[in-house]
Amino acid sequence: MAKIAALVPMRHSSERVPGKNYRDFAGVPLYHRIVRSLLDCSLIDEVVIDTDSPVIFEDASKHFPEVKLLERPEHLRAGTVPMNDVLLNDVKQVEADYYLQTHSTNPLLRSPTIQQAVETFLDSYPMYDSLFGVTRWQTRLWDGLARAVNHNPNILLRTQDLPPIYEENSCLYIFTRNILESKHNRIGDRPFLFEIDRIEAVDIDEELDFQLAEFLYEKREKAA
């Protein structure tokens, strides 16, 4: 049986939303939400947190003793360091056949969705050599030179009839160590675009995102 390791990188400092990874989100630190979702996936063999945060180290040791903690080296701690460099350091320390990477800033991502993504990848590999989460858009898009991207302005189709275009939503990536090392990228030559519901794919970059995500999460929990 293939071993799958889930990697969750988190920095201590955050420029736009200070301390967001361990800030209270609907009653618990934000990162708890994605870690719980990963631990609930039967196809994930190991969950790994990569961080430079003493707060997360202490809290995770207490609440998630089954999670492997990696201390991020000093030279990889700056906000300008590419995520692929961080992941290259992680895969050297964590043995697995496949790696799934996600973020604490996707708190609405559900365990069944993660499970489905893993199943989809395993069923389609090696025809597809990697997988990443996308959000479908069917709206009229233009580039900075006022050129239509995904539609013909002379043929005014209804937006629901437009060919879909997909946004990489950063919710999850599945890849092999070989792809990451050879391409310096999580995405291979034949990636599977795994569609995720727009609300479930909400990502926290700014303060308004945090408030919106918390509102949506609490509303979803009350409706469950």
Image (cartoon, helix red, strand yellow):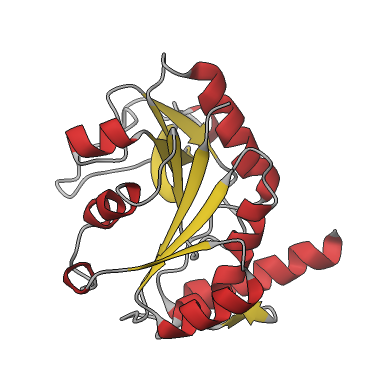
Residue at x 24% of width, y 72% of height = 77
Quarter of the image for residue 45 reads: top right
Residue at x 53% of width, y 60% of height = 106
Which residue is at the front of the view, 1 or 87?
Answer: 1
Relative height, residue 62 to residue 69 (above, below): below
Residue 117 falls left or right of residue 55: right
**Which quadrant: the C terminus?**
bottom right
Return the x and y of residue 57 as percentages of the image width and height: 47, 78
Residue 74 falls left or right of residue 165: left
**Which quadrant: the N terminus?**
top right
Relative height, residue 137 to residue 169 (above, below): above
Identify the residue at the far top of this view: 127
Return the x and y of residue 219 as percentages of the image width and height: 75, 68
Residue 149 in view in this figure: no
Residue at x 34% of width, y 82% of height = 13
Quarter of the image for residue 126 reads: top left
Relative height, residue 117 to residue 27 (above, below): above
Return the x and y of residue 52 as percentages of the image width and height: 34, 76
Residue at x 62% of width, y 68% of height = 64
Residue 156 in view in this figure: yes
Which residue is at the front of the view, 64 or 154?
Answer: 64
Which residue is at the front of the view, 77 or 187?
Answer: 77
